[in-house]
Amino acid sequence: MIEINLVPDIKQELLKAQRVRSTVITFAILIGIIAVGIVVALCVYIFAVQSVRQNIANVAIEDGSEQLLKNSDLDKTLTIQNQLTKISSLNANKKIDSRIFDVLAAIIPPKPNDVQISELTIDSDTSTITINGQASNSYAAVEVFKKTVEGAIFKYNKIDDKPNADKKELVLASDINTSDTSYGENSSGNKVLRFKLSFVYAEELFSPESTNVVISIKTNGNATDSYRGIPSSLFTAPAKDIPGVN
């Protein structure tokens, strides 16, 4: 069968172009309708739904405010809640002041130079410990006490150290000062020397970051100036007898 195309090529191209244009126009109209629908939906949401939600929220806020205002202890409740939120941070940063007992056990000299403490103050703002006490062995005991404090060593580990890490070592006290020395009578009627001793302690002493704390005294033996000023070579053990020699 023989087919003869009576439509010129240019006419076919024109028809094809018309079909493409119609398709493009149709899609453009559909996209426009969809866009208009989206805009309308957004407008409805913003001006209708959001307004309704805002009104509901305002009503809920007003109801909640009225209930809070009816609470006579509102100020106390808010204060307690605020404090509860800070408990964790305060607990993490609290000073371990109980270590002062380890310090006292190390720095109080033994008899006959022992001292008695009547008042002890820890000033965390200036990192200062002040001790008011008395000594029955007068000035010698106070001097021994001061020298013992000077020789105190603070050894510790950091909380983030490895398990087998060596201890860090610091001098426990600095700026050591004795003052307000005067004689008086104790509760038993005995004569004693009253004194005040203060020193600046290392901040790591009471820090919660310090672990495995050890307080030791570096100075051994008699701590008085007179003893420390005598050369050790001046004293020696007594000589032994030689057998068979008179």
Image (cartoon, rainbow, N blue to C red):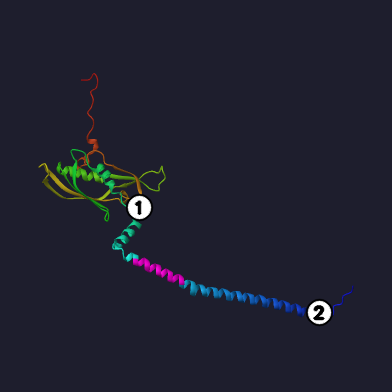
Within 10 Å of disc 2 (Cα), the crowding (few <14, some 14-19, many 20+) is few
Helix, strand or loop for disc 2: helix
Q: Main secondary structure of the magenta part?
A: helix
The boundaries of the magenta stretch are 52-66
Q: Residue at x 59, y 75 (%)?
A: 35
Q: Is residue 194 magenta?
A: no
The part of the image, by quadrant, that contains residue 64 is: bottom left
The residue where tag 2 is placed is 9
> Considering depth in this image, is 65 or 226 the residue closer to the camera?
65
Q: Residue at x 73, y 79 (%)?
A: 18
Q: Residue at x 44, y 71 (%)?
A: 54
Which mark sits nearer the N-terminus, 1 or 2?
A: 2
Q: Residue at x 26, y 44 (%)?
A: 101
The residue where tag 1 is placed is 92
Q: Which quadrant of the rendered structure holds the C terminus?
A: top left
State the image coordinates of residue 181 (x, y, percent, origin top left). Answer: 15, 49
Amino acid beneath label 1: Ala
State the image coordinates of residue 1 (x, y, percent, origin top left). Answer: 90, 72
Q: Is residue 88 left or right of residue 12?
A: left
Q: Residue furthest right?
A: 1
> Considering depth in this image, is 151 or 106 the residue closer to the camera?
106
Mark 1 or 2, which is nearer the eye? 2
Helix, strand or loop for disc 1: helix
State the image coordinates of residue 46 (x, y, percent, origin top left). Answer: 49, 73
